[in-house]
């Protein structure tokens, strides 16, 4: 994205390769360590300190490489600016994860400075910049209009996302003043996601599916809509304090988390991959193929079914455990039918993932990328000649 926006090559491919190697090594060794009990015990931030230091190094390498690419070009678009703000903030907000607190309440309090503000703060900026880039390229929408929408999304993130952290403080031992703060600002958080969905819909209405790579546009529009559904609407459904006191720690949370992460994280990354693949592989038609569409719709159908399964199971769990007072294992036995539905829909989703991976790997990559014979024709920016 950045080389394309900057109209120049990446500052250092070797540096990017070093970062990828470090990141892969850290990830693999961290997962293996978990299997043998090697971790900090801090939920969602389990990595031991050496692994966290490698994460910091990788972040700094990435930011430096992107920043130097933009500097080399001598120009920075609004899309790149928002992306850089998101990347720098993600690095700064990882600092609380490096600290260790013996008091569990204090540990939880600062944990969400990283987790929540990553997920519902800076990632919205990164996702917004991805959306802007893809919609400008795929829909032919005017850059000035798209980047004005980007300012709106960033503003909504700062308005609601930061203080919305309070919805993680409801039941962890902090003062009760966090309850209304969390409730009010959590109710405002979906506005940024609704803004993204409207943003994507407006771009599609303007130009339809005229771009040859309609499959990438499917993933792009789908990401905005699924993020609004999972992260926005389903998040709002259980973050109000009066509701959350019943649903906290149940399968209702899994309902929200699965659809939110898939829509806001996975789908936008897959959209970028599908957009880039025709330029990076040989003999791949830009308009996509039936295999790619099957992968798209099976993943959408499977994840939607999984979300419904978690939701219906969670409602039953809340009633049986929290209202009727039934024990956890007894309640789980009563809602087993929902897990059968979960397994069936997860199988559909898994087939969709398998089709995507097969479609990704079936075409030979272009090596080396510098060969003129293999280089794809440069895509003019919409609105230029």
Image (cartoon, helix red, strand yellow):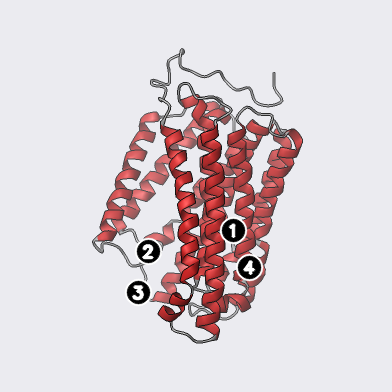
The mark nearer the N terminus, 4 or 2, is 2
Depth check, mark 4 against mark 3: the one in front is 4
Mark sitting on residue 231: 1
Q: CA distance from mark 4 to mark 3?
A: 33 Å
Callout 4: few (<14), some (14-19), or many (20+) C-alpha neighbours within 10 Å? some
Mark sitting on residue 237: 4
Residue appearing at x 64%, y 32% in the figure: 138
The mark nearer the N terminus, 4 or 3, is 3
Query: Where residue 72 appears, x then y in whole percent?
Result: 50, 27
Secondary element type, mark 2: loop
Depth check, mark 4 against mark 2: the one in front is 4
**Quarter occupied by the C terminus:** top right
Is 241 rendered above or below residue 92? below
342 or 170, nearer to the observer: 342
Residue appearing at x 54%, y 75% in the figure: 316
**Residue annotated with mark 3:** 102
Depth check, mark 3 against mark 1: the one in front is 1
192 or 283, nearer to the observer: 283
Q: CA distance from mark 3 to mark 2?
A: 10 Å
């Amino acid at each position: 994205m950045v080389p394309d926006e900057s109209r120049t090559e990446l500052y250092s491919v070797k540096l990017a390769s070093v970062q990828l190697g470090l990141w892969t090594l850290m990830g693999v060794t961290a997962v293996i360590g978990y299997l043998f009990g090697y971790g900090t015990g801090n939920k969602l931030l389990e990595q031991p300190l050496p692994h966290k230091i490698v994460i910091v190094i990788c972040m700094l390498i990435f930011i430096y490489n992107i920043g130097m690419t933009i500097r080399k070009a001598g120009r920075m678009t609004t899309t790149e600016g928002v992306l850089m703000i998101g990347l720098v903030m993600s690095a700064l907000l990882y600092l609380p994860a490096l600290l260790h607190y013996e008091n569990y309440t204090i540990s939880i309090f600062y944990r969400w400075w990283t987790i929540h503000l990553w997920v519902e703060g800076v990632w919205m900026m990164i996702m917004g910049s991805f959306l802007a880039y893809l919609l400008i390229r795929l829909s032919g929408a005017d850059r000035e209009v798209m980047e004005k929408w980007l300012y709106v999304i960033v503003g909504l993130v700062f308005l609601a996302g930061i203080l919305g952290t309070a919805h993680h403080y409801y039941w962890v031992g902090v003062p009760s003043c966090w309850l209304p703060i969390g409730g009010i600002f959590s109710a405002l958080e979906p506005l940024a996601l609704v803004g993204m969905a409207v943003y994507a819909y407006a771009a599609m209405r303007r130009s339809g599916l005229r771009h040859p790579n309609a499959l990438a546009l499917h993933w792009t529009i789908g990401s905005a809509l699924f993020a609004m559904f999972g992260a926005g609407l389903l998040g709002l459904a259980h973050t109000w304090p009066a509701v959350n006191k019943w649903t906290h720690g149940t399968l209702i949370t899994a309902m929200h988390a699965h659809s939110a992460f898939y829509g806001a994280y996975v789908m936008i990354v897959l959209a970028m991959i599908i957009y880039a693949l025709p330029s990076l592989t040989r003999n791949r038609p830009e308009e996509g193929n039936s295999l790619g569409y099957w992968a798209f719709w099976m993943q959408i159908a499977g994840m939607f079914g999984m979300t419904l399964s978690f939701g219906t199971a969670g409602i039953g769990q809340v009633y049986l455990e929290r209202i009727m007072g039934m024990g956890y294992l007894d309640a789980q036995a009563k809602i087993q039918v929902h897990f059968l539905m979960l397994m069936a829909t997860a199988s559909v989703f898994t087939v969709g993932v398998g089709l995507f991976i097969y479609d990704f790997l079936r075409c030979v990559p272009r090596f080396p990328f510098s060969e003129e014979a293999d280089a794809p024709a440069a895509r003019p920016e919409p609105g230029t000649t």
